[in-house]
Image (cartoon, helix red, strand yellow):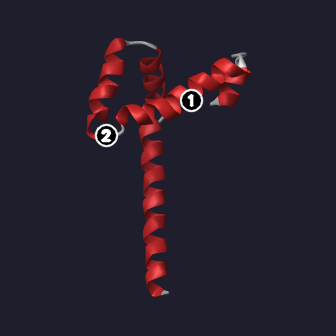
Amino acid sequence: MLGFLAERGVAPDVAARAVEAVVCASARLLEGRVAGAPALVQTFIAYRGTTCAGLEAAEAAGFTAAVKAGLAAATAKAAEMREAARQG
């Protein structure tokens, strides 16, 4: 994300704050209430601002499919590691 913003001429301090807000603040916002994530996403979409534009573009580029593929690979690896640990 920092590289993307730097390539577009965003000042390093501004880029760092933006990336930190997306990565860190988003996690804190959902801490203890992850079940409310779909409603929060819908709030951002309804607002029709920059987050909505990013979410819609990401989805159009296959974001959901990419995340599902990553989760499937991670859970398969976890099962493989669990089985290996069980076998000693």
* Image: 79 above or below 5: below
Q: Determine which quarter of the picture holds residue 7.
A: top right
What residue is drawn where x is 48% and y is 51%? 70
Circle on res. 74: none
Find residue 13 and report its horizontal and vertical position in percent: 68, 20
Residue appearing at x 64%, y 22% in the figure: 15
Do the residues bearing badges 2 and 1 touch, measured as CB atoms within 8 Å? Answer: no
Residue at 45% x, 66% y is 78
Query: Which percent across, then down, holds residue 45?
Result: 35, 19
Q: Is residue 24 above or below residue 48?
A: below
Count of numbered badges drawn on the protein = 2
Give residue 46's position: percent from left, percent from top. Answer: 31, 15
Whether residue 32 sits left or right of residue 75 in the image: it is: left
Compared to residue 70, the image places residue 54 above or below, namely above
Q: Amino acid at mark 2?
A: Val
Q: Residues within 10 Å of mark 1 (few under 14, many from 20)?
A: some
- Picture coordinates of residue 10 (x, y %)? 69, 16
Amino acid on which the number 1 mark rests in the picture: Glu
Q: Earlier in the sequence, mark 2 or mark 1?
A: 1
Task: Locate residue 83: give its quadrant.
Answer: bottom left
**Which is more toward the observer, 59 or 33?**
33
**Split into 4 quadrants, where in the image is the N terminus?**
top right
Residue at x 34% of width, y 27% of height: 41
Q: Provide the secondary structure element on which disc 2 rests.
A: helix
Instruction: Compare residues 17 and 53 and report the one nearer the observer.
Output: 17
Indicate which disc residue 20 carries: 1
- Residue at numbered disc 2: 34
Mark 1 residue element: helix
